Image (cartoon, helix red, strand yellow):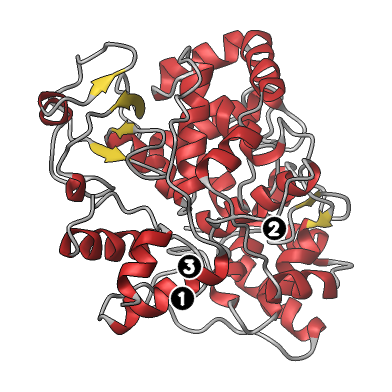
Amino acid sequence: MYLSLARSTALSLVISASLMSPSFAQSAPTDAPAGTAPANAPAAPCGGDLPAFLAKVKSDAVAAGLSAEAADKALTGAEIDPKVIARDRAQGVFRQTFLEFSQRTVSQARLDIGRQKMKQFADVFSRAEQEYGVPPGVITAFWAMETDFGAVQGDFNTRNALVTLSHDCRRPELFRPQLISLIEMVQHGDLDPATNTGAWAGEIGQVQMLPRDIVAYGVDGDGDGHVRLKQSGPDAIMTAAKFIQHLGFERGQPWLQEVTVPENLPWEKSGLGGSMTAGEWFNLGVKPRDGNTGFGQLKADLVLPQGRLGPAFIAYPNFKIYLEWNKSFIYTTSAAYFATRLSGAPPYLKGTPEQGLTIEQMKDLQTKLDKLGHNVGEIDGILGSGTRVAIQEQQKRLGMPADGWATPALLEALSK
């Protein structure tokens, strides 16, 4: 799927609009999206003379059952946009701790607007939950995180962005199918190729989706016969609900629950991908702040974004849809927390997290972990999942609480 690319692009738009600080300690992923094309897909045609390239795209669209007229309408006037190439080559990395990021994105103003939107579109949200099992708060949080409820959707011509990225030979296999789907949207009358704008990577609308997924999961929420995620709130709500259901959201189950933790736990069992149930964590002294232990039978991970002294959450199976939406741990946890707030949860307890590391210190730590045989990926100064797992293993070896949080004490211990 295109998800990691799409969400990071939308996220950067919202961050820019919100004038957020770039002093981050966790990133939204900005590399190639995973799964848009099969791993063994043949190389897509790319490069060369643009008119010849567009003629081949038209031929492929017609072979796929679309009309020549729609292809001509979609592709006539298409241009290579050098600004798209520049964005693709220089995708930035946003680094911020969970407390910093979540407090900026889950602001009181956004919560107020979100609740207003939930009231304004109450009938649409009710229909979305009835048909797809996705609560209003989950949809609304994504709506806010992606585009500030449609206020920041991007100003790149969508057709030109997808032509540019399909013609470019870096990742044509990811974007050429999106260009064919855009032609299908034009044929349906859902998009004007000359005027439609969105994000630089081709995402469209208030919940930022690429054409291929709009074609597959788009819902006409307002009954006008079209799926127009850019203009229509009901279309965006219903389409997001159907897409989230497709990602695996289970009706009636929680996604994230704030908890308090005792002083001593098997911290090495915290983090994503564990094998414990919520009930097993509760039996160890983990306590839900809302007092609800009714989902104790579900698999559950103890999530500590800034270690055992910071905010703590139980992540239930539905949390996986956030990881499908965006691979960034900080983004997904913030979006899931946002949804709990819109669903009635109080603000989290900030706690008193231990001091973290600077970017250069984190790179130093990753270098040391790499030399110890851990797979931390790129030495980029980002506390990603691989680095967290490596940290936990070293914390356990050194007799430290293995909560996965990078601290000066750990760096010093590994420097000896």
Quadrant of image for the C terminus: bottom left
Helix, strand, or loop for circle 3? helix
Callout 2 crowding tier (Cα within 10 Å): few <14, some 14–19, many ≥20? many
Q: Which residue is mark 1?
A: 364
Query: Quick one: 313 or 41, which is closer to the camera?
Result: 313
Q: Which residue is mark 3?
A: 362
Disc 3 marks a residue whose amino acid type is: Met
Disc number at residue 202? 2
Query: Quick one: 166 or 74, which is closer to the camera?
Result: 166
The answer to whether 282 is drawn above or below residue 377 in the figure is above
Image point (33%, 16%), residue name: 289
**In the image, residue 294 lies at what x, y percent?**
19, 14
Q: Nearer the viewer, mark 2 or mark 1?
A: 1
Q: Residue furthest bottom?
A: 48
**In the image, residue 120 lies at what x, y percent?**
69, 10
Image point (43%, 63%), residue name: 35
Disc 1 marks a residue whose amino acid type is: Asp
Image point (57%, 34%), residue name: 142
Q: Nearer the viewer, mark 3 or mark 2?
A: 3
Helix, strand, or loop for circle 2? loop
Callout 3 crowding tier (Cα within 10 Å): few <14, some 14–19, many ≥20? many
Query: Quick one: 249 or 278, which is closer to the camera?
Result: 278
Q: CA distance from mark 3 to mark 2?
A: 33 Å
The answer to whether 320 is drawn above or below residue 170 in the figure is above
Helix, strand, or loop for circle 1? helix
